[in-house]
Image: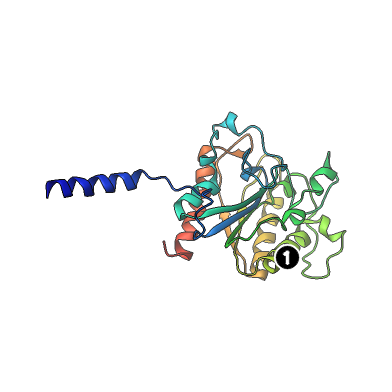
Amino acid sequence: MRKLFLFLVSAVLLSACVHYDPFDPNDSSATKLSVLGDSYSTFEGYVYPDSNECWEHYSEIGVDDVEMMWWYRVAVEMEWSLERNNSFTGTLICNYHEFPNGDHYMRNSFIHRMYGLGNPDVIFILGGTDDVYKNAPFGDYVYANWTDEQLCSFRPAMAYLLDNVKRLYPDAKLYFLLETDPFPDSITEETRQNLIESVHRITNHYGVDCIDLDIHKFWNHPNVKGQKDIARQVMERLEVDFNV
């Protein structure tokens, strides 16, 4: 009996030490998540395609391991596998390019990269911060028949993005993650409120869940605490939606 007890205790302790691996290629049964993002979600060696540019200063603000990234934390907590992390630093949702090196970022905007998310069950879109930081026009609310000119503005491009992502991945659960106070020293309160109102209105139009985020940052990027902030606020919503 004593040997059986010790065996059971050892088994429990061993199972507690097992670390879930969201990159396990053999875990075909796991729910698959994909990320469409900007620098907040990049990490060198963990973006798709691998030519996507990553923010190169994460190690300088303490985020020196992929396990610290918000999406990695969420995957481990939910025991999901990572399908694609199609994030690219400095990119806007829209195709606005009237700023230094804007043509480069326009070619890699969210609405250009939305096709490269694989075959996910859950999609997280985290963006919009660079649209307001780089002074992209908000534009009008347009929900069909978009022109190239309209896609250089935030509101039409945001609608175009959600419209197409829902069409491209009809079986995926979609979340838009909105930082509600991006670049507080660089944008006006009016711009901030316009961003929030725009995202809430467009996500509501498409029936897409929006998770508002309050993020701790250093050098205008989520540091270790900030990555935890994102993961915690996302998990609070997932715990309700997935009954975990």
Residue 1 horizontal/vertical position (percent): 12, 50
| Picture quadrant where residue 219 is located | top right
Residue at the spot 76% in from the left edge and 51% down from the top edge: 109
Give the residue type at disc 1: Asn
Q: Which residue in the rendered view is the most extreme toward the left?
A: 1
| Display colour scheme | rainbow
| Picture quadrant where residue 100 is located | top right
Residue at the spot 66% in from the left edge and 69% down from the top edge: 206
| Picture quadrant where residue 10 is located | top left
Image-based side of 39 in relation to 92, left or right:
left
Query: Which residue is more in the foreground, 106 or 191?
Result: 106
Residue 22 horizontal/vertical position (percent): 51, 49
Against 128, is 100 above or below?
A: above
Image-based side of 31 in relation to 132, left or right:
left
Residue 39 horizontal/vertical position (percent): 66, 42
Query: Which residue is more in the foreground, 192 or 142?
Result: 142
Residue at the spot 71% in from the left edge and 52% down from the top edge: 190
- In this rendering, does residue 179 appear at all? no
Query: Which residue is more in the foreground, 87 or 234?
Result: 87
Viewport quadrant of the C terminus: bottom left
Against 10, is 196 above or below?
A: below
Q: Secondary structure at mark 1?
A: helix
Residue 218 horizontal/vertical position (percent): 59, 35
- In this rendering, does residue 138 appear at all? yes
Q: Residues within 10 Å of mark 1 (few under 14, many from 20)?
A: some
> Label 1: which residue?
164
